[in-house]
Amino acid sequence: MDEKGVTELAGGLVDHSEEMRTELDRRLFNLKTLYDVSQQLLGAVGVREILKNFLLMTMGNFGVMDGFVFVKDGRSRESRQLVSIGFRGVERSAIEKAARRVLVRGTPGAVVLREEALKGIEFLDPYAACGVGFCVDEVCCGLLGLGAKLTGEPYTAEDKDLIGTLVNNLVISVKNARYSEALQEAYDEVSSLNRAKDKVIDHLSHELKTPLALLMASFNLLKKRLASVPSEKWERTVERGLRSLRRLSDMQSEVEDIMRDREYTAYTFLQGLLDQCADELEVLLAEEVGEGDVVERLRARIEELFGPKDSEAEEIDLPGFVLRMMEEMKPFFSQRSVQIITDFQATRPIRMPSDALRKIVTGLVKNAIENTPDEGAVEVKVRKGRAEVELLVRDSGVGITEGNQKRIFEGFYPTQETDDYATRKPFEFNAGGKGADLLRMKIFSERFHFRLEMSSERCRHIPAAGDICPGRIELCEFCRSEGDCARSGGTTFRVVFPVFVEGEKTTNGVREA
Amino acid sequence: VDRPKNQIDTSRQGEVLVFDVKGDVTRESGLIFREAYEEAKEEGVRRIVLKFDEKAYFNSEGIKVMIDLVSAAKDHDQQVAVTGLSSHFKKIFRMVGISKLAKVFDSLEEAVKTGDDSP
């Protein structure tokens, strides 16, 4: 090769290298656009925003002055979106019309249109422009139209590949945005229905107020007018009617509170249920056997079990009260070898009806003794808090399995297996009972606004509900002492009473929650 | 990487209005460029020079912003010259056809001085 030849070859290599660099720059720019499209479309939420960003990026990448993207939902005429840039003098309707003509439905994805198809769009030069049809899903499809490039060069096969890939990204983003919009619409609709429902309930509640007041007044008037008639003929029936009316009135007030967004707690739920059941039973009996002794005895029995609703609250020194209760109970469990450990701190007084408190204290202590084997111990403590007084009753008994703990306050739910369950004398080990004591305490806690909590650890030596404790530590094959037994499991009930403050607002003599 | 947002300082150099552009050019730049261009239109200048940082980055949306700006200037019989581009973006401007509407120069002096050579 002569000197001229070498120079030409070197020049050719330099040119070739420059071409390669330019090609690399172009590909890098294309890749960056692809990356930007996928990134930016992910962040956009509305279909229109997605279409606009996409069109700008695509037009910028290919150096295009005019372009449009059109999306149509086959289910609704309103769900059409057109974003167009440039195309001065071209009406929106012309773009929509052209798009409709060439829209394709089928598998989600992009289809680059052939020149023949582009000939149907009069404002696009079929030889210099590019059109891509795409399907988002079964009902939604669209069309991208890009005008001629500023360079005047036609779209290459490589350009069309890239546009196809970009449109596939667009399809995914539009699909996600459509789901998101559909969810938002559904949410808005539910919110609107909810508002309508609230309005109806509010209206009904308001409309009930007057007739309820009228009925109440009428019943009271009736009571006065019937005063000359022997009370056993009418009083019970009228009282029952009045109770039901009061319940309706309470419900109306509760609904009103809920609708006014006041803090609402189902504080009296159990109490209401209990009253309703008692009345239902009364009505049933009255219908079957007439008003009389049986009905009265039933009401008396329910009141004995769950306490009269209108018991008078009084100021009570809890440590002294519990001490007296323990002394009273002693003779009833003298046959048991259970050690009672007491620890009473001086506390501020609490306020509640003494008959209810008596039922709580005796119920908890009796439950603890019945669950503790002989030679075991029961702890009864009263502790003072800043604004509370705590009563703790702990037994070193068998404990309650996790499954049973969840249902312990539901009432009439024995925690022993049915086969082992036998109603023995009160205070005997595993005496059982109907489980109503704890339900009663739960009802009291709602009625008199104290907290009732329980924590329990099932004896690790007898983990299953069907495992049996022999009832005396010396008969236990695992424990040798009271300490062993106490460490193996047990149950603690914690009752937290608010302290009584003079002059505080009260309802039925009990501090309001 | 956090890149600086756009800032455009304008200055007159004789008959030429120079846009000194700081930061990358993206979709967000569109409004800033439009405002600056409206000012230039009101002043009635015939020639605009866009001076970029050599490190300035243009994404595809930024390229579209530039296309819109130079085509708007062309519609109003204004000439646009560009300077300060990195070699990469000089090629991109050429590839997407912006250089057909706005001549690209290596220095500000050349861009300001050269008048009628512009496309």
Image: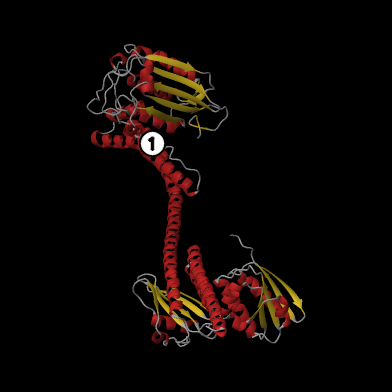
Q: Is residue A346 above or below residue A48?
A: above
- Residue with the mark numbered 1: A270
Q: Residue furthest front?
A: A2
Q: How many marks?
A: 1
How is colour applied across the structure in the image? secondary structure
Q: Is residue B39 above or below residue A257?
A: below
Q: Is residue A73 left or right of residue B119?
A: left
Residue ID at (56%, 70%): B59
User: Image quarter for residue B69?
Assistant: bottom right
Q: Quadrant of the N terminus of chain B?
A: bottom right
Asked if residue A306 can be seen in this view, the reply is no
User: Image quarter for residue B113?
Assistant: bottom right
Give A463 or A229, whichever is nearer the viewer.
A463
Q: Is residue A114 above or below residue A405?
A: below
**Label 1: chain letter:** A
Q: Is residue B55 above or below residue A303?
A: below
Q: Position of residue A405 (x, y in %)?
A: 35, 32
Q: Is residue B82 left or right of residue A212?
A: right
* Callout 1: SS: helix
Q: Position of residue A378 (x, y in %)?
A: 39, 18
Q: Position of residue A344 (x, y in %)?
A: 49, 17
What's the amino acid at mark 1?
Leu
Q: Is residue A200 left or right of residue A231?
A: right
Residue ID at (51%, 67%): A36
Give A68 or A355, whichever is nearer the viewer.
A68
Q: Quadrant of the C terminus of chain B?
A: bottom right
Q: Position of residue A420 (x, y in %)?
A: 24, 25
